[in-house]
Amino acid sequence: MKIKAFGICAAVLVCFSCASAPKPPKSSGTDDYVPDDTDAISLKIPEKTSRAYFSTIKPDVLALAENASPESLRRAASLLHKSDSEQYAENERVLLATCAAIMRIVWPSQTVNWEVPDVTVANPYLGAIESAKRGLYDSSTGNTDFLTTVLPSLVLVTSESRTEYFSQAESALRAGLSLRANSVLANYLMGLLLFREEKFLDALRYLTIALNGAPDCQELVYAHGMALFKTGDSNGALASAERLLSYSSQNVKALELAAEAAYASGNSLKTETYVNRVLQLEPENLQYVLFRARILMNSKDYIRASSLLDVYARTDTTSRDYLLLRAQLLRDWNKNNTGAAETIEKALLSHPDDIEVLQLAAELASSANVRIGQKSAQELADAILALDANNATAMAISINEKIKSADWQDAYTLSGRLIADGSASDAMRYKHVDICIALGRMEEANRIASALYSAHPLDEDVQQAYIKVLVASGRRTQASQLISQLLPNATQHMKSFLYYERSLLGTTEDSVLGDLRSSLTANPRNRDALFRLYQIYYNKKDWRKAQYYLKQVVALNSSDPAILKLNAELDSLLGR
């Protein structure tokens, strides 16, 4: 299961801001307040030319306010500050109040350390801010200057429930950036908007500009880190999260980003550290209870993983992530394929197009030879490939199913695709060799196996693939010599394989039977050796001995319909 990470990391970048943003008021007649466009602060727009409202304010001060980084807001306020004996002009009061509002809404980790004079005159600047606090995009500002154009988009920080204004906000923000391209505020808001639209690469570009303008701003470090994570740079995201934690070691959102990024980058030690720190601060964080269970499952600590899943189940037994983990636990620890199939079927009903759910369902259906959600493993694999034509897991499952049904040509087509595009695992390369042997494509099988053997002559899996090709292509001398060379120091599992392959080279029944029995002595569960002994005794019409060996094959795979059919035939021959 992916950290898409693991489905836990929040996709919204407003976590630092929402905590301090004013809550929308509740209406007197209902329990839940739903903002409406009629709630926007409607104001008469001054009939002034662009930037005229602040024409008496020095351009460098206005530029600082429009840049709107935490530092530039402080500098603008400092330059506007007057002594007690001096009076603020109306537009100075408005600009000071606007700077303070931006700081409180957008950069809540910072403090407003200047005096904010009262503003009694209605104006589009504070009107847009008040509308944003209510979760509304104020389109009545007139867009007469940079601030009236950009301020309505503060709603991106204060609310995440509405999206209908996105197109208007994007146009306005682009207009604002055309006036002040390096504005930290405008670039940040544009980054948030594009992130919300899941245009993560574009969002990263704007957030990078914003961060360059305020490299120590916590909100920007977090937003930039989230964009890095969403664009696949998990190491960069982890660095951002750890930078945030250097400011505040108990920042839960930073800890969550660190945990997600560490997990995605494969750093299991850091993942566990950060997940544990989240749970220390928020022991009731059920998503991270599941995350912790996932980590324990990966390390095969099934007992503790099971305990955490039991804790989660007290509150919820229907979530996708819970059902995925429970199904995996039933399969891997309890060896209960039936229970695992029933569990993943529940997830499949709720998430029929979820690739991760489909993959686990297909794997279970394939290994247990059962139907899940009324679909076979092949049908489930096909459903995945319909969503993602290059899904390597689904292709591998499909190949296994085609091998089971002896559909060698279709299996070859699929495995050949994996080999050709370089995405085939080593296991799939060995399987492709087997498929080539079954189809008589000995030249191709030999080319792949020989290349593997030349590169990794001591690898047991490679040795097995190479020996299979030698035996199947009739190179008896080479095969015999290599088998004799490997046998003295081979593991029991490898000895079983070597004796079985040597039995295929035997010229007398006694030598064949001797090698097959030696194969089973080394590994009594060698399915190939057991099945070949069944075939030998079946051909000799010794039904009882044939069934003795076939029943052991059945015990190893009790759900294989082809084997069950053969066993039923022997029952009939034996008069049972």
Image (spheres, rainbow, N blue to C red):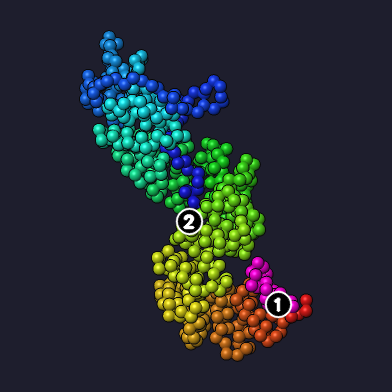
Q: Position of residue 516 (x, y in %)?
A: 62, 81
Q: In the displayed orientation, state which residue is furthest to the top.
A: 85
The quarter of the picture where residue 85 lies is: top left
Could you give the CA–CA distance between mark 2 and mark 1, rounded to whole angstroms?
41 Å
Q: Residue at x 64, y 72 (%)?
A: 562
Circle nearer the viewer, 2 or 1: 2
Q: Residue at x 47, y 49 (%)?
A: 4
Instruction: Give 253 or 194, whichever is nearer the viewer.
Output: 194
Q: Nearer the viewer, residue 171 or 550?
A: 171
- Hey, which residue is sitting farthest bottom in the picture? 508
Relative to 489, is 339 on the left or the right? right
From this viewpoint, is residue 85 visible? Answer: yes
Residue 207 picture location, percent across and down = 34, 40
Q: Which circle marks residue 458 in the picture? A: none
- Residue beneath label 2, please? 387
State the quadrant of the C terminus.
bottom right
Main secondary structure type of the part rendered in magenta: helix
Q: Is residue 94 above or below residue 506?
A: above
Q: Which disc, if any, is residue 569? A: 1
